[in-house]
Amino acid sequence: MSKMVRKQIYIQKSQEERLKKLAEARGISEAEIIRQALEKEMRFSSVYRPAYDPEAWKKLVAFWEELDKRGPVEPRPRDWTREELYDERMSRYDRKPD
């Protein structure tokens, strides 16, 4: 276990009651519940971020550059109309278009 640092906090009476019940139900200490909640909060906070994988970043940039070299996709003529798509979708649900 890593070295612990003592912190004192104030919580509302209702929070204390729920914390005690939760700790008893889970069979862990109140402090452990607070540590888990703190870790969860920091994990989703924009301040706490895991280290980036520089190799993965390089691969992603190389992929983008390769896509950029290919240029735009050549447009192809459509073989359908909007009305045909609408009619087909409506027929799937046994509905008749107006």
Image (tube, rainbow, N blue to C red):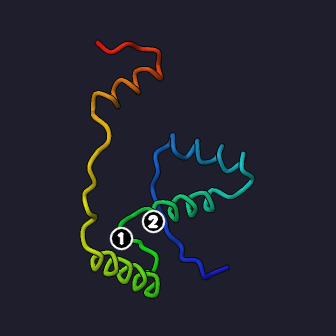
Coordinates of residue 2 in the picture (x, y in percent): 63, 81
Q: Label 1, on which residue?
A: 47
- Name the secondary structure under disc 2: helix
Q: Residue at x 40, y 26 (%)?
A: 88
Q: Classify residue 89 as left or right of residue 74.
A: right
Q: Classify residue 44 as left or right of residue 23.
A: left
Q: Classify residue 49 as left or right of residue 21.
A: left
Q: Quadrant of the C terminus?
A: top left
Q: Quadrant of the N terminus?
A: bottom right
Coordinates of residue 65 in the picture (x, y in percent): 31, 81
Name which residue type carries label 1: Val
Coordinates of residue 56 in the picture (x, y in percent): 46, 82
Q: Earlier in the sequence, mark 1 or mark 2?
A: 2
* Residues tagged 1 and 2 counted as in contact (Cβ below 8 A): yes
Is 14 rendered above or below residue 29?
above
Label 2 neighbour load within 10 Å: few <14, some 14-19, many 20+: few
Coordinates of residue 32 in the picture (x, y in percent): 63, 62
**Alpha carbon of mark 1 to alpha carbon of mark 2: how far?**
7 Å
62 or 25, nearer to the observer: 62
- Identify the residue at the far right of this view: 27
Which quadrant holds residue 47? bottom left
Is 76 rendered above or below residue 67?
above
- Name the secondary structure under disc 1: loop
Q: Label 2, on which residue?
A: 42
Is 23 rendered above or below residue 97?
below
69 or 4, nearer to the observer: 69
39 or 59, nearer to the observer: 59
| Tag of residue 39 | none
Name which residue type carries label 2: Met
Which quadrant holds residue 57? bottom left
